[in-house]
Image (spheres, rainbow, N blue to C red):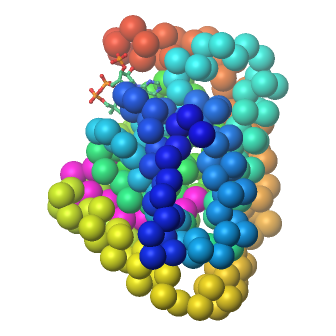
C-alpha cells in the first residue's frame, strides 16, 4: 500500500494514514482503506482497528487539488457514492474501528472519522465540515452523520459557517468520545483499543451489528440524495471559484451561479 501503513500488536491493528502534507483523501487513499479492511476482516489476529494520521493532521479531507481533474456532475456523484460505500463498510465493519484524531479532521477526513465506531481527539484538534467554504457540500455522508452526533442545530451551524470546532468541544457535543491533551492522545487510544481487544470477538461483532439498527431508512435516502446533490453543486461556477480560491490561497467570492 502507498498511503496506509499498519502493524498489529496485542490484536490491535494500528493503521496510519500517510499522505503528506495533509493526508488528503485522494481517491487512491479511500480505495486503500477498503483494501485494508479486506486484509484485516478475516485475520483472527486482528480484533480492533485503530486509525490515525501521520504528520500534522489526521486528515484535511478530500484532495481539493484532485477535484480540478473531475469535470462532470455525474462523475462527482459517483465519486461521492463510492466514498460513501467504503465509509459505510467502515461503520458496518464487524470489528471495532477507533479514530485517534490530532491536528485536524476536516471534510472527508471528519466523514471518515464519523464512520468509525469511536473517536478520541486531541483537545486542540479542529473538527469540521468546511465544504461550503469551497462552494461545495459534503459528499461522504457528512450531512447525515454529523446531526446524528451533535444534533440538528449544531450540525447546521457547523455546515453553514464552515467553522471547525475544537476537540474539547467535539467531546462536549458528542462528536468525540473523549478529548485529551495532544501528547496523551495516542497512548489513551492504545489503552482503549487494548481494552476492547480483550472482549469476545463474537460478542463484539454482535454488539456492533445491533448498533446498526439505529439507522433509519431516511438515513439511507439522505446519503443517496447527498451524492446526487454533491454532483449538482460541484458543476456550479461557485464551486469552481471555491476550489480555485483554496488553491490560490485567497477568499472565494460566490455569485450564486
Ligand atoms: C466529499 C468530501 C469533500 C471534502 O472533503 S472537500 C475538502 C474539505 N477540507 C478542507 O476544506 C480543508 C482544507 N484545508 C485547510 O483548511 C487547511 O489546509 C488546514 C486547516 C488543514 C491546515 O492549515 P495550515 O496549517 O495553514 O496549512 P496549509 O498551508 O493550509 O496546508 C498545508 C498543505 O496541505 C495542503 N492541503 C490542505 N488541505 C488539503 C486538501 N483538503 N486537499 C489538498 N491539499 C490540501 C495545502 O494546500 C498545503 O499545501 P502546500 O504546502 O503545497 O501549499
Residue 123 is covered by the magenta coloring: yes
Which of the pair 149/28 is nearer the observer? Answer: 28
Q: Is residue 175 left or right of residue 117?
A: left
Q: Is residue 69 left or right of residue 193?
A: right
Q: Position of residue 214 (x, y in %)?
A: 67, 77
Residue 118 is covered by the magenta coloring: yes
Which of the pair 170/10 is nearer the observer? Answer: 10
Residue at 65% x, 13% y: name it. Answer: 69
Residue at 52% x, 58% y: name it. Answer: 114
Q: Position of residue 19 (x, y in %)?
A: 46, 33
Q: Quadrant of the N terminus?
A: top right
The image quadrant that residue 103 belongs to is top left
Above/below status of 241 relative to 35: above
Judge whether residue 141 can be spotted in this image: no
Which of the pair 51/8 is nearer the observer? Answer: 8
Q: Position of residue 18 (x, y in %)?
A: 44, 38
Above/below status of 63 relative to 154: above
Residue at 64% x, 52% y: name it. Answer: 36
Question: Ligand 1 quadrant?
Answer: top left
Q: Is residue 25 left or right of residue 250?
A: right
Above/below status of 110 relative to 118: above
Which of the pair 66/19 is nearer the observer? Answer: 19
Q: Quadrant of the C terminus?
A: top right
Give the extent of the magenta segment: 115-126
Judge whether residue 121 can be spotted in this image: yes
Residue at 68% x, 41% y: name it. Answer: 31
Amino acid at each position: 500500500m502507498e498511503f496506509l501503513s499498519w502493524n498489529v500488536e496485542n490484536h490491535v491493528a494500528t493503521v496510519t494514514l500517510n499522505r503528506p502534507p495533509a493526508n488528503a483523501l485522494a481517491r487512491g487513499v479511500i480505495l486503500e482503506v477498503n483494501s485494508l479492511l479486506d486484509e484485516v476482516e478475516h485475520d483472527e489476529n486482528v480484533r480492533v482497528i485503530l486509525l490515525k494520521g501521520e504528520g500534522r493532521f489526521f486528515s484535511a479531507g478530500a484532495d481539493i487539488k484532485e477535484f480540478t481533474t473531475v469535470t462532470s456532475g455525474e462523475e462527482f456523484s459517483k465519486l461521492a457514492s463510492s466514498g460513501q460505500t467504503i465509509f459505510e463498510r467502515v461503520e458496518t465493519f464487524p470489528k471495532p474501528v477507533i479514530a485517534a484524531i490530532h491536528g485536524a479532521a476536516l471534510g472527508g477526513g471528519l466523514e471518515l472519522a464519523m464512520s468509525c465506531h469511536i473517536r478520541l481527539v486531541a483537545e486542540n484538534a479542529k473538527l469540521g465540515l468546511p465544504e461550503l467554504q469551497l462552494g461545495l457540500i459534503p459528499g461522504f455522508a457528512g450531512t447525515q452523520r454529523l446531526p446524528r452526533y451533535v444534533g440538528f442545530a449544531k450540525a447546521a451551524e457547523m455546515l453553514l459557517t464552515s467553522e471547525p470546532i475544537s476537540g474539547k468541544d467535539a467531546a462536549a457535543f458528542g462528536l468525540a468520545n473523549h478529548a485529551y491533551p495532544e501528547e496523551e492522545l495516542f497512548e489513551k487510544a492504545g489503552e482503549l483499543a487494548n481494552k476492547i481487544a480483550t472482549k469476545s470477538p463474537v460478542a463484539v461483532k454482535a454488539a456492533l451489528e445491533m448498533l446498526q439498527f439505529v439507522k433509519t431508512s431516511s438515513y439511507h435516502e439522505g446519503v443517496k440524495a447527498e451524492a446526487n446533490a454533491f454532483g449538482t453543486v460541484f458543476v456550479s461556477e461557485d464551486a469552481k471559484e471555491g476550489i480555485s480560491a483554496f488553491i490560490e490561497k485567497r477568499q472565494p467570492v460566490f455569485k450564486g451561479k
